Each structure stands twice: as C-alpha cells, then as structure tokens.
Amino acid sequence: MDTTGLREAYAALVTEANRGGFGAPHDGGWSAERVVAHVSVNDALLTAVTERLIAGRDASLDNAPATDPAALDELVERCGDLLGVASAVRESGDRLCELLEQLDDTAAATPVPTRIADGGQVVVDQPMPWAVLMQVQEHRHLVAHTEQLRALRV
C-alpha cells in the first residue's frame, strides 16, 4: 500500500501536538494529551490487525481500548507529557506505515470485522476492507484529531 498521504497526516498531527499552547478541553472533551494518546493506542490496534493480515490470519478491530480514559491517562503517565505522547505517535505511525507497505493487494482488500465507537455512539459495526479503513484513518480520523488539537489551542 502507498502510505505517503498517511505519513503526511501523522506528521501534521505530531507537528500540531509539538506546538503546544493548549488550554483545557471544552464541554468535558478530551485534553490534548488524551487526544494524542488516543491516536497512539488506536495505532497499536491497527498495527495488530495489519500484522495478522500480513501473516494471512483472521483479524478484527474494536476501538474500545482507544477510547478508555483510564488507558489514555496511563499512556500519558508512561510517556511523561504531551511531547512524550507525540513521540509515541510518531513511532507508532511509522510502524503502522511500514507494515501497511508490506500488504499485497489481496490482504489490503480483506474485509475486517470492525466496530468503532465515537463519543459513546457506534459509528461502524460491519466488515470493512482494510485499505478503506486506512483511507479513513488518513483522511478523516487523523485530520479530525489534528483539528481537535487546534481547537484546544489558547
């Protein structure tokens, strides 16, 4: 798979996180640290699915761990601060892209049972071709969180 655009989307998010200057979240939303931690935890889930597809094994995706506030806070604590979490995302994004570049067309087209919740609402609960889900990661998910960071800047 070509990961040029995905790498650019990761770079934009990491750059935004590294700029800092974030205020408190609005209306009970996530802090900048939690936003970036969410991407890192989600990357671990995407990486695990991609590794299974490369190995020719069945895979499924449920993003629940990536939306668990306790798990996100634990990652922030492990990384030390926002810059540490941003560094983790740079590494996890690079790792995911390296793996995606190993996928052949058949593996990339594999429908993966997918359950994605956002804000407590299930937005996807059906098999999705992995390449399509990675396009969503590039064009919607990472872009949305980059914009979320910008909205938190004071």
Image (cartoon, rainbow, N blue to C red):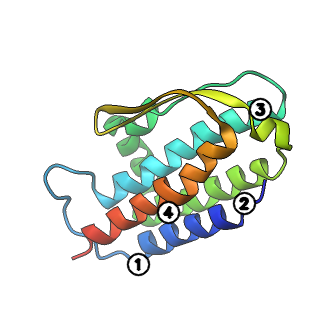
Q: Position of residue 37 (x, y in %)?
A: 43, 50
Residue 121 point in image, percent of width and height: 30, 32
Q: Which residue is mark 3?
A: 53
Mark 1 to mark 3 CA distance (whole Å): 35 Å
Front label number (4 vs 2): 2
Query: Which of 3/86 is in front?
Result: 3
Q: Secondary structure at mark 1?
A: helix
User: Could you say which quadrant of the image residue 18 lies in?
Assistant: bottom left
Residue 86's label in the rendered image is 4
Give the side of residue 142 with respect to residue 33, left or right.
Answer: right
Question: What type is the residue that disc 1 sits on?
Answer: Arg
The kind of secondary structure element at disc 3 is: helix
Residue bearing the label numbered 2:
3
Q: Is residue 101 above or below residue 112?
A: below
Residue type, label 2: Thr
Q: Is residue 120 visible?
A: yes
Q: Which residue is mark 1?
A: 19
